[in-house]
Image: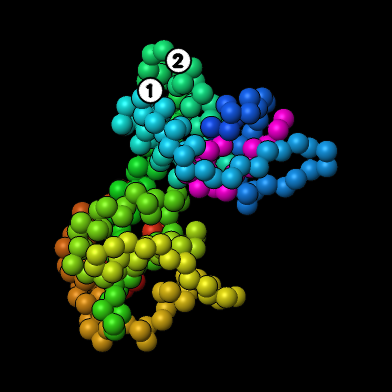
Amino acid sequence: MKQVVYDGSFAGLLTAIFEVYEYKLKDVTLCREGDFSPALFEKHHVVYTNEQKAKRVMAKLNSKMSTAALSQFYRCFLAELSEMDNCLLRYAKYTVSSKNSVENNYRNPDVLLVQQISRKVYREKHRMEAFVRFKLTGDGLYYSVIQPDYNVLPLILKHFRERYADQRWLIYDVRRKYGIHYDGSSLEEVSIDFGSSSQASIVEERSSVLDEKEELCQQLWQQYFSSVNIPERKNMKLHIRHMPKRYWRYLTEKMA
């Protein structure tokens, strides 16, 4: 079994798929650079991301897949699951080799897995759009910390750019150590070096940088949340199902 090592980007994945065909590689397994551990006498192929190769693969998939299927393909890549890259390679090869559309052939295990995982990522995207809570800093920047199960930050940018088009904001994923900053006109990916300190604790607890009215706004939001609750109709199981506890640490209404 030959390992095909790529840089972990989506363009890198598409380049890897291209080179599997280009070099007629057989019995391969895809591997991201961060997960690659070379073994003695084990063969491997290193992929250098090539935008032209990536575009050719995307064009081919676009000719064989619907827009919905392409979105599912991309969401599965963002799931960052250990076996997902190889599933996507098999799915792409199955799609290219078939005369007819295969995206609804759930008898194929890879097609079925893509459908299942893409739904989970899509559900996480919607939760992030609902659960992001911004805090205002003294210099007018709204920032929010998230820690989603999947890498959904690229999927929620359109929502927040349209909703907060006239504001400066930063959404930072502490699990993946990168964020997206919007300056009022353009988006930029950012990475923050926190040294040996906990990223979550530094980003969350630096109250000294908050706007002087931010604490009052948080208190008002907590009071509003408390006032609309009806104790007699409390259903904690249903509440947790719609708002899992893993999100609570970042929700203003749960910090009261």
Name which residue type carries label 1.
Answer: Lys
Image location of residue 96, percent across then percent down: 46, 21
> From this viewpoint, which residue is outermost toward the top?
99
Which of the 4 image quarters holds residue 256?
bottom left
Determine the residue positioned at 35% across, 42% down: 122
Q: How many marks?
A: 2
Asked whether, in this view, residue 241 is left or right of residue 223, the answer is right
Instruction: Find out whether residue 15 is within the magenta segment.
Output: yes
Quarter the N terminus occupies: top right
Determine the residue positioned at 35% across, 84% down: 209
Which of the 4 image quarters holds residue 217?
bottom left
Residue that mark 2 sits on:
98
Residue that mark 1 sits on:
64
Q: Is residue 116 visible?
A: no
> From this viewpoint, which residue is outermost toward the right?
40
Image location of residue 85, percent across then percent down: 54, 37
Determine the residue positioned at 37% across, 17% down: 101
Within-10-Å neighbours for mark 2: few <14, some 14–19, many 20+: few
Q: What's drawn in magenta, residue-wise?
A: 1-16
Mark 2 to mark 1 CA distance (whole Å): 9 Å
